[in-house]
Image: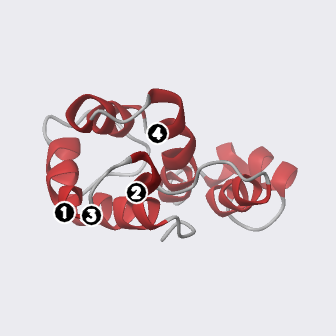
Amino acid sequence: HHKLCHTLGGSFDLPHAETHAIVLPHAIAFNARAAKVELAPITELFGGTNAGHALHAFATRCDAPVALRELGLRESDLGRAADLAVKNPYWNPQPVSQAEILLLLQNAWAGEPPAF
């Protein structure tokens, strides 16, 4: 999550807090496959069966930003962003691939619920 947000902020000049708020539900949903027990309290607090989906629904209900396109990221930048995000990887609970990060970014760009 953090590396992806810094990639988006540093390479595409997106605002820090809003970028984190938008990406967090998607990153949590992605990592839930490997950290379901650790994320269970979030799922219980917000309801549902997936912590990332629950956070996205909460953000939507609160009228918080949910789409990277609203921050100025162009759809044509998503491939480059995914490439940069997986370059020089470091530990993550769920192993990452360029294709999965691209899918995560596509949903975050469009404001859709997490894909995972």
Crowding near the residue tagged with mark 3, few <14, some 14–19, many ≥20 C-alpha atoms within 10 Å: few
Pick whichever of labels 1 and 2 is earlier in the sequence. Answer: 2
Tag 3 near tag 1, CB within 8 Å: yes
Q: Determine whether the residue tagged by mark 1 lies in a helix, strand or loop.
A: helix
- Which label number is shown at residue 69? 2
Q: Is residue 84 left or right of residue 3?
A: left
Residue hosting label 4: 19
Residue hosting label 1: 76
Amino acid at pointer 3? Glu
Amino acid at pointer 4? Thr
Q: Whole-Å distance between the Cαs marked 4 and 3? A: 15 Å
The image shows residue 97 at horizontal and vertical percentages of 23, 58
Q: Whole-Å distance between the Cαs marked 4 and 1? A: 17 Å
Pick whichever of labels 4 and 1 is earlier in the sequence. Answer: 4
Residue hosting label 3: 75
Tag 2 near tag 3, CB within 8 Å: yes
Pick whichever of labels 4 and 3 is earlier in the sequence. Answer: 4
Q: Determine whether the residue tagged by mark 3 lies in a helix, strand or loop.
A: helix
Q: Determine whether the residue tagged by mark 2 lies in a helix, strand or loop.
A: helix
Amino acid at pointer 2? Arg
The image shows residue 84 at horizontal and vertical percentages of 16, 43
- Residue 41 placement: quadrant: top right
Count of residue discs: 4
Q: Determine whether the residue tagged by mark 4 lies in a helix, strand or loop.
A: helix
Pick whichever of labels 2 and 3 is earlier in the sequence. Answer: 2
Q: Whole-Å distance between the Cαs marked 1 and 2? A: 11 Å
